[in-house]
Amino acid sequence: MKARALVLREFGKPLRMETIDVKEPGDDEAVLIKVVGAGMCRTDLRLWAGTEPREGFRLPFVLGHENPSSSAHLSFSSLLDTATMVT
C-alpha cells in the first residue's frame, strides 16, 4: 500500500512530499486509518531543526501527528465501520 507524506531527510532542510510504502495491517491489528490531513506541532518543528534529540529517532522520518482521519481497513474484531471518522 502507498501513501503520500512529508519526509524529513536532513535536519533544517525543506521537507519533501514523497510516496512511501505502508505495511498492510495484520489480522491482530484492528484498524488502519486513512489520514486526510496532517499538522505539525512545535515538537515537530524542533525535531525538523535537529534541536530536540529523541532516543531512537532516525532519519528519514515522517513528521506530523495532528491528523483528521477515517478508518480504511478493519479486522474481524474491530467495532468500527469502514469510513468512520476517528480522532
Image: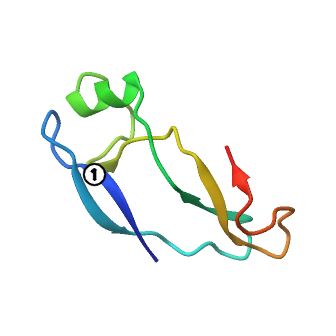
The spot of residue 85 in percent (x, y) is: 70, 53
At mark 1, the secondary structure is strand
| Residue of label 1 | 7
Closest to the observer, 29 or 17: 17
Q: How is the image coloured?
A: rainbow
Q: Residue at x 39, y 25 (%)?
A: 43
Q: Is residue 37 left or right of residue 18?
A: right
Task: State the image coordinates of residue 13 (x, y, percent, origin top left).
Answer: 12, 39
> Residue 51, how many percent across, how many down?
24, 22
The answer to whether 71 appears left or right of 6 in the picture is right
User: In the rendered image, which quarter contains the C terminus?
Assistant: top right
Mark 1 crowdedness (10 Å alpha carbons): few <14, some 14-19, many ≥20: many
Q: Foreground residue, 21 or 28?
A: 21
Residue 53 in view of the camera: no
The residue positioned 70% from the left and 63% from the top of the image is: 31
Residue at the location (70% across, 65% down)? 83
